[in-house]
Image (cartoon, rainbow, N blue to C red):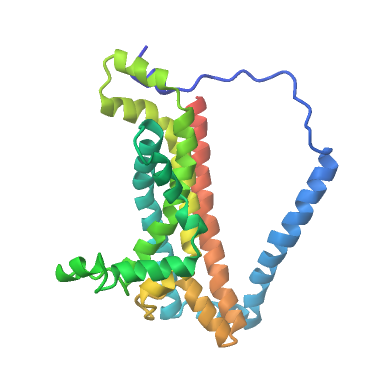
Amino acid sequence: MTIAALAEPPRRVRARWVQPSILPGFGLAMGWTLTYLGLLVVLPLTALILRPWELGLSGVWSALTEPRVLSSLRLSFGAAALAALANVPIGLLVAWTLTRYEFPGRRLIDAFVDLPFALPTAVAGIALTAIYAPTGILGEPFAKLGIKTAYNPVGVFIALVFIGLPFVVRTVQPVLQDLDVEVEEAAQTLGATNLQRFWLVVLPTLAPSLLSGFSLAFARAVGEYGSVIFIAGNMPLKSEIAPLLIVIKLEQYDYAGAAAVGLAMLVISFGALLAVNAAQVFLAKRGRA
């Protein structure tokens, strides 16, 4: 048996019978599901899709091709993607440490991971600004090196990493806990190094959960508002995010223009998440092969 063979999950035998569901019948359950989805998801999204077309096709195109709009969309999605990518190795390291090692204060650190979930976004933004401002604890040393960590796109990236990290950690951690250690031990007995054990045995199992954590962190970061506006500086064409531009347009009673920017964010987000889900399906099929 090779090391790569150990990484392959066991093939499941299809059951010949289905366990009865404890939930109500299919018709009732599906009816409530479609009702809730229609009222809470489909209806608001339909209104968002229809509202921009009050401007007409040329008006929507003109609203979306403004340099300020393009710059804000580029910053929001670019910083969100980079922050989610940065959170994948960081989140994996944190989840690995909390799962594989016993040390004093582990439960306290485990609780700290969830802090961005409970912390109001405005409070997080104020705290990050105080730390990374040019006179802050961390911002001042960077400023002496000529690196500005606040009031520019770097500040946006820092805030998005902060709010996205728990999504990766909490997605990967259960998979690590359920990972069969005996498979790793078997690979070690076959002469695998630590790097080979991680790359050939552990990482293929964690790949779908890492992708899920990436997609959750990315989705949260794209729409983040409160924790970003304090540290970003909000300078048009430089550090202004798309959600803030939508709020500005709403304050100017440009509802159709705000909806046009929201529609662009919806389409781009849907395409990105669809690509991530396709990659997850591919990895799942490859694992079952």
Q: Residue furthest bottom?
A: 252
Looking at the rendering, which quadrant does residue 192 occupy? Answer: top left
Asked whether residue 203 is in view, the answer is: no
Looking at the rendering, which quadrant does residue 195 occupy? Answer: top left
Q: Position of residue 284 (x, y in %)?
A: 51, 33
- Residue at left offset 53%, top offset 77%: 246
Above or below: residue 75 compared with residue 87: below
Above or below: residue 238 compared with residue 254: above
- Residue at left offset 45%, top offset 22%: 180
Q: Position of residue 205 (x, y in %)?
A: 44, 31
Q: Is residue 13 left or right of residue 229?
A: right
Above or below: residue 278 compared with residue 285: below
Q: Nearer the viewer, residue 187 or 122?
A: 122
Q: Residue furthest front?
A: 104
Q: Position of residue 185 (x, y in %)?
A: 35, 17
Q: Position of residue 239 (x, y in %)?
A: 36, 74
Q: How many marks?
A: 0
Q: Nearer the viewer, residue 73 or 132?
A: 132
Q: Nearer the viewer, residue 83 or 166?
A: 166
